[in-house]
Image (spheres, rainbow, N blue to C red):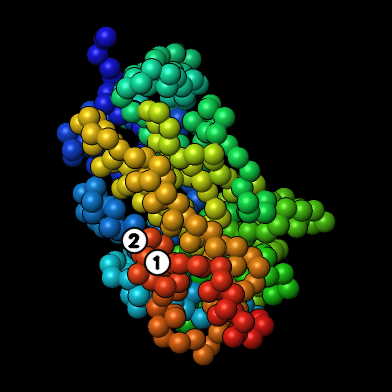
Amino acid sequence: MDTMDADVLIIGAGPAGSVAARMLKLLGRRVVVLEKERFPRFSIGESLLPQCMEFLEQAEMLEPVTAEGFQFKNGAAFSHAGKLTEFDFTEKFTPGWGTTYQVPRGRFDQILANSAEQAGVPIHYQHSIVAADFDTPGRARLTSVDKNGGQRDWTASMVLDASGFGRVLPRLLDLETPSSLAPRRALFTHIEDKIAVDNYDRNKILIAIHPKFHEVWYWLIPFSNGRSSLGVVMPQGFTDDRTGDPLQILREIVMEEPRLAELLSNSNFDTPTNQIGGYSANVKQLQGQGFVLLGNAGEFLDPVFSSGVSIALKSASLAVPLVDRQLQGQEVDWQVEYEQTLRQGIEVFRAYVDAWYAGSFQRIIFEQRQLANIKAMISAILAGYAWDRTNPLTQRCAQKIEAIADLCPPL
């Protein structure tokens, strides 16, 4: 048998792919990354959660991220109908990082990819995967097409799919299955925010709820350069009776929320609006013979709690030592050690997403008489610690959310 190109092929150079690549390289593995886009490139998911910092530490990537001067983040603020409530992530139930950053993803992802390359990982940009073959045990093959139309086969013992919304292997291997979450649509852009209000904390993401429609919510993520990411998430069809281009529609909906209307009264909406719909996704399995799905390539829930990058980095942290063990010839129970473990945290986030759109978790968020220990448990989950089984609110989540919500008044 001829020599393979790598021990591990990774599809995608985003956070999951770059972190996994560097972690594998630190273990002495030969890694090659194939990335469809050219970096830097635009992406949403700009508000990190504190647990992300633990995974960046594991990959020895924290120093270049910290040195960049990204916007410091220590929590989340929620706004609805004149009410404002805040969660400080340093006051959480679970030990560990309580602060992180809010990052323009183009720059953040570039830093992580550069760090992987500096460790000796080759990243081949503008390579699209058009075929995958896992029929031969211990030998996976991917076929890529580069920007000039050139086609090439790549071989390795394992493939990690970190392709995000591209969902390369789920598409090629017919692994996609409908999400249990209702289809929604998001409009988003970057603005020059010009926020001068004294009672605004740039160290927190602001999540606001539409004053009339509780399923419509907004994010405002400030960056360190005077700009912000701004978006609205809504049911499909919510804007069907509105006229104007997407940027006009976004601004119109934003100005319907009093807090945002006040904060952004002088803002410069200077960037075209992007949109994405039906983004929630699921798969039949997160692993199979010769491959593992990381992050959004496997499952994406909803942007409301900024869980995407956390799940992506958690999946990389779980998968890498298992890949290393398998390459050593040891037995790995991927179903138990990877899939079941990763899905534990995903299901926690899912329960809170479901409760958010049902309105019950929104009632809990805005309860002013909230007990300090309950708030600390919620804060830990919002900070990304959904895998902490010692937190009572990560178990039997749906029932506990409803029980707590029953004690809270309507919004």
Towards the viewer: 45 or 178? 178
Residue at image location 75% in from the left, 58% down from the top: 238
Q: Quadrant of the N terminus?
A: top left
Q: Is residue 100 above or below residue 405?
A: above
- Residue drawn at x 67%, y 51% is 183
How far apart are labels 2 and 1 at the CA level? 7 Å
Q: Mark 2: few, some, or many residues within 10 Å (few <14, many ≥20)? A: many
Foreground residue among 274 and 168? 168
277 relative to 96, above or below: above
Image spot of residue 353 (x, y percent): 56, 62
Q: Is residue 115 left or right of residue 281?
A: left
Tell whether 283 sits left or right of 28.
Answer: right
Residue where numbered disc 1 is placed: 383
Mark carried by residue 51: 2
Mark 2 residue element: helix
**Tag 1 or tag 2, which sits nearer the N-term?**
2
